[in-house]
Image (cartoon, rainbow, N blue to C red):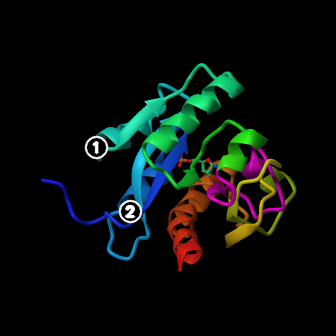
Amino acid sequence: MEKLTGLNKIKTAVFISGNGSNLRNLIKFSKIKKTPISINLVISDVSEAIGLKYADQFNITKKIFNSYNIKNTEKKILILLMKEKISFICLAGFMKILSKDFIKNFNGKIINIHPSLLPKYKGLNTHHKAIANKDKFAGCTVHYVTEKLDSGKIIMQKKIKIVGKDTSISLAKKVLKQEHKLYPAAIIKIFN
Ligand code: GRF
C-alpha cells in the first residue's frame, strides 16, 4: 500500500560520489513530519560509491552514471529528473562540476554542502588548508549552485573552533557532524 505521507513534498534528488553520510542524513530528515522534501532519486557518478547502499536500504530509485561525458551524461540525467518529476537537487559530496546548461534547467533549485566557511577554501582539501593556515575557525556552508564552483549565494553556515590538537582528519569528523545538522536546517530555511 502506498504511504500517504510525502505526497505533497518537494521531489528531491541527491547526487553523491562517496560515503553518503549526508545522503543518509537527508533521507532521515525526509522522513520527519516537518520536512519539506521527499527523496525520490539518488544519482552517483561512481558505481562503487558506498552511499548507494542507503538508496537500497530506503528503497529509493538510484542511478549510476559512471562514464562521465558531460554533455551526454547530463542529458541523460535531465531526462531522468524530468521522468521522476524532480524539482529540487541536493549535492552531497558529488565530485563532478555541473555545466552551466545543466544548472540553467534547475536555476535556483540546486544546493550543495561544502566543508568550509565559504568564501574561504573553495574546492578540495579544505580542512588541510584551514590547519595549514593556522585558522582559528572552520565550518561548513550550504549554498546555491551556480556555474562558478562553490560561489553561489550562501544559505546557511556553521562555524566551529579549531583546537590545537586538531588534524585535518579530526577536523573533517567534527565538521561532518555539523554538516548533518546544517543541511536539513538550510532546507527548512529555503522552504519556509
Ligand atoms: C562532505 O564533507 C561534504 O561537505 C563534501 O563532501 C563530503 C561528503 O561526505 N562536499 P559524505 O559523502 O556525505 O559522507
Identity, as a three-letter code, of the amino acid under mark 1? Asn
Q: Is residue 14 magenta?
A: no
Residue in the foreground of this view, choosing between 169 and 22: 22
Few, some or many C-alpha atoms within 10 Å of disc 1 (few <14, some 14-19, many ≥20)? few
Q: Secondary structure at mark 1?
A: loop
Q: x%, y% of residue 133?
A: 87, 56
Q: Residue furthest left?
A: 1
Residue 77 in sight from this viewpoint: yes
Residue in the foreground of this view, choosing between 164 and 99: 99
Residue in the foreground of this view, choosing between 59 and 173: 59
Residue underneath mark 1: 59
Residue underneath mark 2: 30
- The residues colored magenta run 106-128
The image shows residue 142, relative to residue 62, as above or below, that is below
Q: x%, y% of residue 68?
A: 64, 23
Whole-number angstrom distance, CA of label 1 to CA of label 2:
13 Å
Q: x%, y% of residue 90?
A: 56, 53
Q: Residue furthest top?
A: 67
Q: Is residue 107 magenta?
A: yes
Residue 17 in sight from this viewpoint: no
The image shows residue 122, relative to residue 164, as above or below, that is above
Q: Which residue is found at the position 32% from the left and 74% from the top?
A: 33
Q: Main secondary structure of the magenta part?
A: loop
The image shows residue 48, relative to residue 164, as above or below, that is above
Q: Which residue is found at the position 51% from the left and 62% from the top?
A: 180
Identity, as a three-letter code, of the amino acid under mark 2? Ser
Mark 1 or mark 2, earlier in chain: 2
